[in-house]
Image (spheres, rainbow, N blue to C red):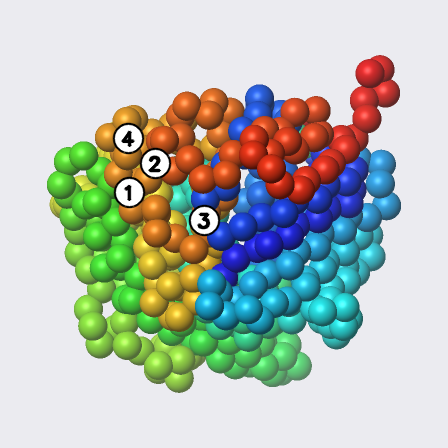
Amino acid sequence: MFVTQLSLADFRSWEFAELDLAPGVTTLTGRNGQGKTNLVEAVEYLASLGSHRVASDAPLIRFGAPRAIVRARVQAGLDDTRALALEVEIHAGRPNKASINRGPLRRVRDILGALRVVLFSPEDLALVKGDPSDRRRFIDDLLTQRWPRLAGVRADYDRVLRQRSMLLKSLSGRRGPTSPDAAATLEVWDEQLARLGGEIVAARLQTLAEMAPHVAEAYLAIAPNNNDATVAYKSSSLGLDPGPGEAVERPVLESTRDEVAAQLRSRMAARRNEEVARGVTLVGPHRDDLVLSLGHLPAKGYASHGESWSFALSLRLGAYALLRADGVEPVLILDDVFAELDEVRRDRLAERIAGAEQVIITAAVASDVPASLAGRRWTIHEGTVTPEAAGGSTGSPAKDDDG
Ligand SMILES: Nc1ncnc2c1ncn2[C@@H]1O[C@H](COP(=O)(O)OP(=O)(O)O)[C@@H](O)[C@H]1O
Ligand SMILES: [Mg+2]
């Protein structure tokens, strides 16, 4: 799958931008702050309805503008000329809108799955060094790309979690037994949390099982020193607490959503008093984590800077390989990553992605990108995108008031 056209209006720093893209490698170079990441972030947004840089939509709208518009034309494959025109309108303070082939979608999230993107950026170091929430977001975004229906399950889970936690909080201040009404309401939330949570956890386990070999393989291919990169699942709700280097056992990885739901139910029953006393939901996928190890050491806190980079990159390459194995070639975006890699890793990465259907690379310094990945090179300067060879692209920046 590849993007043939990208156009933006009032997205980030871009008042207007239009780019013709092609399969193969495209490299966008330009000084820092010229809007390179903003461009690829727009592609990421169409694929995930989110951004790796911000948790909310507001910063994506050009400062002072009422809304942002991102449009792309996406072709299914090199031999598959089916094309989709995707559009999302991002509004501050009222619901966004989306359309496919000019037909408005009932829900914005129905656009998910139409474009698949794997983006690797310096922020991904947080996958190794950051909090569990960073790793949960990584795996959950992958679930949504594989099975767009899960976007709805995630949204429902978040809502149930909020409401259940609110009820627990209101109960936690009280003395004496819980009223029958409150107990009945809690039971309703328990059931939904178990059902939705079961679905999320089972999908995560399956995805992890299928992705882990790709991650290990990518690590060996990228990192200069051979080491086993493992990804395991940690969940106190399921009694999973793998030590460094330990993988999760097959039968667990193959748990069905009903099996996981049953475990969540019994876990909630066991921890009911504690949950009421503390006023928090202690059971469910929102408490889980991925455990990353190199050999017999945890990656977090032990891996060197270079190893952490290689691991983060391997996670993205693993996700890429998994989506590809699912039968769709995602668009691969490497945002400002070559500057962070030494020459060995640069060359190994270049070799690995050379055959990808579409790769979009951004770099401040063109020579950081290995020559073998030359592809089409464009320069971004003061809001204009200039192709080094012939090609169509125009753009105009958000004007600075003081010039
Ligand atoms: N919502 C916005 N409105 C206007 N300008 C923005 C907005 N968000 C980011 N910018 C500007 O975009 C620039 C950063 O663009 P970015 O794509 O990150 O640059 P780079 O080329 O280094 O990747 C900054 O100057 C920032 O002020
Ligand atoms: Mg950037």
Report how far apart the C-alphas of labels 1 and 3 lie in the structure: 13 Å
> Given the image, on which type of amino acid does mark 4 rest?
Gly
Q: Residues within 10 Å of mark 1 (few under 14, many from 20)?
A: some
The disc, 4 or 1, on the residue closer to the chain's N-terminal end is: 4
Labelled pair 2, 3 in contact (Cβ < 8 Å): no
**Cα separation between marks 2 and 4:** 23 Å
Q: Do the residues labelled 2 and 4 touch (CB within 8 Å)?
A: no
* Number of the front mark, 4 or 1: 1
Q: What residue type is labelled 2?
A: Ser
The residue closer to the viewer here, 343 or 23, is: 23
Q: For this view, does 12 lie left or right of residue 92? A: left
Secondary element under disc 2, as helix, strand or loop, is helix
> Crowding at label 4, few (<14), some or many (≥20) Cα neighbours within 10 Å?
some
Whichever of labels 1 and 3 marks the residue nearer the N terminus, that label is 3
Q: Which residue is drawn at 85% across and 36% down?
A: 64
Mark closer to the chain start, 3 or 4 = 3
* Circle 3 residue: 24
| Residue named by callout 2 | 372
Labels 1, 2: front one: 2
- Residue at (71% x, 29% y) in the render: 383
Residue at mark 4: 306
Mark 1 near mark 2, Cβ–Cβ under 8 Å? Answer: yes
Is 400 placed above or below 284 here? above
Ligand 1 shows up in the quarter that is top right
Q: Distance of mark 2 from mark 3, alpha carbons?
A: 12 Å
146 vs 9, nearest the viewer: 9
Mark 3 closeness class: few <14, some 14–19, many ≥20 residues within 10 Å: some
